[in-house]
Amino acid sequence: MDKDETFESFFNSFSLMPYKNVNFFLVCNSDFASSGTATTLKTEQEVAIALGSNVGNRMRNFKEALRLMKNYGIRITRHSCLYETEPVHVTDQPKFLNAAVRGVTKLDPHELLTVLKKIEREMGREDNGIRYGPRPLDLDILFYGKLRITSEKLIIPHERIWERPFVLAPLVDLLGSDNDDHTVSHWHSLSMLQGGIFEAWEKLGGESLIGNNGIQRVLPIGDQLWDFSKKTYVMGILNLTPDSFSDGGKFQSIDSAVSRVRSMITEGVDIIDIGAQSTRPMASRISTQEEIDRLIPVLKVLRGMQEMKGKLISVDTFNSEVALEAISNGADILNDVSAGSLDPNMYKVVADSDVPYMVMHMRGDPCTMQNKENLQYDDVCKDVASELCLRARDAEISGIPAWRIMIDPGIGFSKRTDHNLDIIMGLRRIREEMAKKSIVLSHAPMLIGPSRKRFLGDICDRPEASERDSATVACVTAGILGGANIIRVHNVRDNVDAARLCDAMMRRKCQMDD
């Protein structure tokens, strides 16, 4: 063993020891530099930080905390899902919102602690508040690099990390089931369990806890938190285009669009998805101004309708300027068939807003998506999962938290008939493949949109799109039973019935399993 290998072996073993004296540790760690008592890191260290809030606007508190962390030198790289949880110890207080983030920083551990406490105070937390009581913001360091730390002010990993579902659930989200780096391997080792953090989570109950035991996985839309596991949400299609494949030209006037929306509300729709740019194969791209002129007048009217109370509005566009106008005029969800690939400014527009972002799988654009080269897959479910993860990670790194991302495998986009069938039957497998890279993305609400598409007509010998509603019902039924949370459809009434029946069957199965 040469000198360098001897030092590396010594350093690796030392880094697992309790971190009691900063200056002494710095002498042995080449990643740190010491000047008197001041400490500066030469290289960034990866950290995991837990967030909690139950006072004021909890989502706004989280958003501000992330902004302040960035300002103080903590670059966030991953976000968990959001969890609404019942309080523990002091139970007479509002529910908490919990999450966790991964990031990198050059702050040493105690400097990081100081910064997080400063952020808590800036957000209104009082130093003399009730222990375990209400607080606008709670920030805890879960892990710091490959260190185990014990000092008077700081213990890492956090003492009670392994016994708290509201900490472990978001922590697991920050990982992938395929180990992603050596630092994460060390984090797993700190659990002292062979299966690492995953085994610790399973020992508490794992996924069986979600929706029970006072913990819900939620997605923020506006000022509300939505739980997409409770029921299947039906998204009704409103095309304001003259050339959509199924209903182009029917709803171009405001009056006809409003009439159609009122019908869908009567039939039980949950979300209205408005599109002013056709995305059918070979659709020509219209100007930004024309898309805005088609969309915004209708959006404004719908937003002001009393009947729309409790309903969501999604806008289907891959144009960032249109997205900005839509969000400014009340869109609740941004539905982008290109997942940001057709407009480099899309991520920034969504990141600067508070709306959820629907990331759909497509290769190329509507004019090229069915080209031969875009239809080549080794394993369509695995490839779609991998490509969705890449687009979602790009969105997250650009500032869109994973807790605001929804996914769509893109049925009919860059897919042949056999690909579409494999996807519909393989939704659980897509989630499993995504979990290998990002567990948080595998939990994202999933939308499927097979409604009236050509592959249904090819299979059922129905050349007219309007004759494919029965096939659509069969398709979405399979999708819901396979794990879809949202179905995007033209015929709302029949698919609402299908969704309600599927939900009832799944509830009954849960009762029988219990």
Image (spheres, helix red, strand yellow):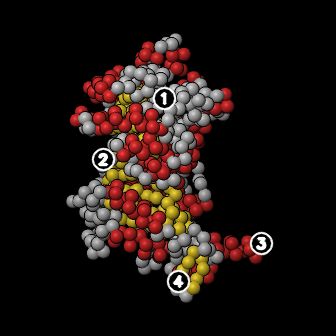
State if disc 2 and disc 3 touch (CB < 8 Å).
no
Three-letter amino acid code at disc 1?
Ser
Query: Where the N terminus falls, by quadrant?
Result: bottom right
Which of discs 1 and 4 lies nearer the camera? The answer is 1
The mark that comes first in sequence, 4 or 2, is: 4
> Which type of secondary structure does the marked residue at label 1 adopt?
loop
Three-letter amino acid code at disc 4?
Ala
Distance from Cα at disc 1 to Cα at disc 4: 60 Å
How busy is the neighbourhood of tag 4: few (under 14 within 10 Å), some, or many (20 plus)? few
How busy is the neighbourhood of tag 1: few (under 14 within 10 Å), some, or many (20 plus)? many
Q: Is residue 66 above or below residue 177?
A: below
> Which type of secondary structure does the marked residue at label 4 adopt?
strand
In this view, the residue farthest toward the bottom is: 36
Q: Residue at x 37, y 24 (%)?
A: 251
Residue 206 x, y percent position in the rendering: 43, 49
The residue under label 4 is 38
Q: Residue at x 35, y 26 (%)?
A: 253
Q: Please say whether residue 436 is visible from this viewpoint.
A: no
Residue 294 x, y percent position in the rendering: 40, 32
Which labelled disc corresponds to residue 224? 2
The mark that comes first in sequence, 1 or 3, is: 3
> Which type of secondary structure does the marked residue at label 3 adopt?
loop
**Closest to the observer, 41 or 275:** 275
The mark that comes first in sequence, 3 or 4, is: 3
Quarter of image, res 276: top left
